């Protein structure tokens, strides 16, 4: 199972909106509505931002939102803040035998 | 509060095995599956496998099928990840994570660095 494809890096100025794409296939992102997004600061464990494509856990700021079209999921940070500078990973369920696959990761610079 | 506390860093020689523990607390241990994810130096996240702490059944990524074993001890609320046949490419930080739904890992351990070197 190949990793989901993400842009290597994206950048934005404080207050701007940035969007990170996550492209998979009809076997994972395109088939299941089980896509999640994680934020990871250097030396830290990943933190769950979005699950089930669009759901935000309690405590996650509203500026983080998720969506999906076909085999591509997206994470949008609306009004990016300096503390949002981190690496971001998508993850998708890929069925009973493959189970899960992560994205290649995106470095976000503010 | 929910906590997943992992064992400390390990240094292993090529060909050896490593066993990392992950002690869960703050919730009903048998309620949620626990998955293991690793991250090589400067690399992305790689999903390894999962275990259901209640029944003990497991699932492994194809890349690890032959040399990964996930177990649990329900009496202590501890999960274990054992990886055999280590090579330098297994040098990574290994995480355990509680999954509350498909692909939804809401709590993570602090990570355990496993270094493989002769």
Image (cartoon, coloured by chain):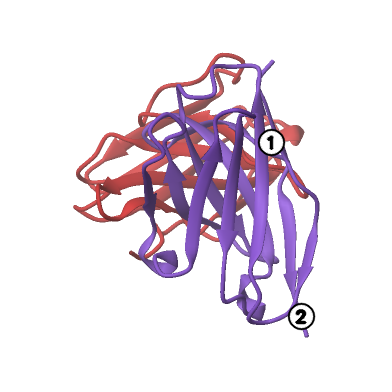
Judge by depth and name the residue closer to the eye, B92 or B73: B73
Residue A9 visible? The answer is no
Q: How many marks?
A: 2
Residue topped by disc 1:
A84
**What residue do we see at 63% from left, 81% from top?**
B15
Residue B118 visible? The answer is yes
Label the purple chain with its letter: B
Judge by depth and name the residue closer to the eye, A105 or A17: A105
Residue topped by disc 2:
B117
Density class for disc 2 (Cα within 10 Å; few <14, some 14-19, many ≥20) is: some
**What residue do we see at 63% from left, 69% from top?**
B17
User: Mark 2: which secondary structure?
Assistant: loop
- The answer to whether the residues at label 1 and label 2 have Cβ atoms under 8 Å apart is no
Judge by depth and name the residue closer to the eye, A36 or B33: B33
Please state, as top left, top right, bottom left or bottom right, where the N terminus of chain A lies in the image.
Answer: bottom left
**What residue do we see at 61% from left, 29% from top?**
B77
């Amino acid at each position: 199972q190949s990793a989901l494809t993400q842009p290597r890096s994206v950048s934005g100025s404080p207050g701007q909106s940035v969007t990170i794409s996550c492209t998979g296939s009809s076997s994972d992102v395109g088939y299941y509505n089980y896509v999640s997004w994680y934020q990871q600061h250097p030396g830290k464990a990943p933190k769950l931002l979005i699950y089930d494509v669009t759901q935000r856990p309690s405590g996650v700021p509203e500026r983080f939102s998720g969506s999906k079209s076909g085999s591509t999921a997206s994470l949008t940070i609306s009004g990016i803040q300096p503390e949002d500078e981190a690496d971001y990973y998508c993850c998708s369920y890929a069925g009973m035998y493959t189970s899960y696959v992560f994205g290649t990761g995106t470095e976000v610079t503010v | 509060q929910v906590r997943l506390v992992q064992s400390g860093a390990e240094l292993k020689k090529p060909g050896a095995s490593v066993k990392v523990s992950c002690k869960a607390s703050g919730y009903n241990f048998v309620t949620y599956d626990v998955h293991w994810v690793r991250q090589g130096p400067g690399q992305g996240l790689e999903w390894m496998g999962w275990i259901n702490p209640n029944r003990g059944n497991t699932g492994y990524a194809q890349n690890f099928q032959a040399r990964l074993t996930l177990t649990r001890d329900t009496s202590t609320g501890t999960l274990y990840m054992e990886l055999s046949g280590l090579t330098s490419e297994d040098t990574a930080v290994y995480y355990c994570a509680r999954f509350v739904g498909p692909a939804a890992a809401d709590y993570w351990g602090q990570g355990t660095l496993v270094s493989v070197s002769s």
